[in-house]
Image (cartoon, helix red, strand yellow):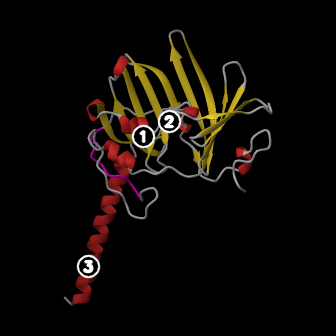
Amino acid sequence: MDKRRLNRITLALVALMVLAAALMLWSSLRRSSHITLPEPGPDPDQLTEGDAPGGDLPTVVAVTPETVQAAVETLTRPESYSRAVTVEQFWNGGSGTYEVTVAVRDGWTRTDRTLPDGRIRHAVTNGETTHIWYNDEKSVYTVPAGDISADNEQTIPTYEDILRLQTADITEADYRTVSNVNCIYVEAGELPEGYVFRYWVSVDTGLLVAAEKLLEGETVYRMGALTVDQEAPDASNFTLPDGTALLNG
């Protein structure tokens, strides 16, 4: 057997091994194809798929309660995007649902949320300054953002909540799929006051796409934002009612 034929056989075997590994990886990540948040799954020591957000090389990270925070830190959120966040809250004898539309561009985040009294609260923040107005009013309240982050304005858990968890409080961590969105899953509890928190973070966008808060086994809070448009929102979204343009162009 000549050397060129041997090389061709070797390359063919390598290609078959890579294809088999890719099929196994894809199968492991496709945990669920429906919208219902998935139940705890088997082996968490799996690999992320595809390219790492913000990089050209594949990222290989085993996710466990001990490593999940390091895995989340490797993710990068888009600089520009828009999406709708649905929030459900539950209490004894009732529940409520509302939606927040979100636009992010050039460091600014705009949220538009319908309040229980029917008013629409508009807020635009860059993490340092927040501009707030209601309905179609021209009056704008401008205040320091303080500890109110852009995630708080969306009424969702802050992204950093996962990173601040004590490792001992993380009870589960692995890869899961929610409505075809591949995620890193984190569960923590029972934390102070008996709460259990569940987070799903997209490995493609680095965004928190689902979360739950439970008390004594009952869901008291749930959010979902599974669809993301990564086109840059129009600059008009960041022009205040008094005509002040927060973006250039």
At horizontal 70% and vertical 18% (from top left) the residue drawn is 117
**Numbered label attached to residue 134:** none
* Residue type pointed to by label 3: Ile
Disc 3 residue crowd, few under 14, some 14–19, many 20+, Cα 10 Å: few
Disc 2 residue crowd, few under 14, some 14–19, many 20+, Cα 10 Å: few
Mark 1 lies on a secondary structure that is: loop
At horizontal 30% and vertical 48% (from top left) the residue drawn is 46
* Residue type pointed to by label 1: Ser
* Residue type pointed to by label 2: Ile
In what quadrant of the picture does the C terminus appear? bottom right
Magenta stretch: helix, strand or loop mostly:
loop
Of callouts 3 and 2, the N-terminal one: 3
Task: Please state the extent of the stretch shown in magenta in the rendering.
Answer: 42-50
Q: Is residue 229 visible?
A: yes
State the residue lying farthest toward the front.
Answer: 144
Mark 1 and mark 2 residues within 8 Å of each other at the beta carbon: no
Mark 3 and mark 1 residues within 8 Å of each other at the beta carbon: no
Mark 2 lies on a secondary structure that is: loop
Residue 13 pos. (x, y %): 26, 72
Q: Which residue is mark 1?
A: 32
Q: Which residue is mark 3?
A: 9
State the residue lying farthest toward the left.
Answer: 1
Q: Is residue 166 above or below residue 57?
A: above
Disc 3 from disc 2: Cα separation: 44 Å
Compare residues 18 and 80 and report the one nearer the observer: 80
> From the viewer's perspective, is 124 left or right of 188?
right
Q: Nearer the viewer, mark 3 or mark 2?
A: 2
Q: Nearer the viewer, mark 3 or mark 1?
A: 1
Residue 172 pos. (x, y %): 30, 34
Q: Which residue is mark 2?
A: 35
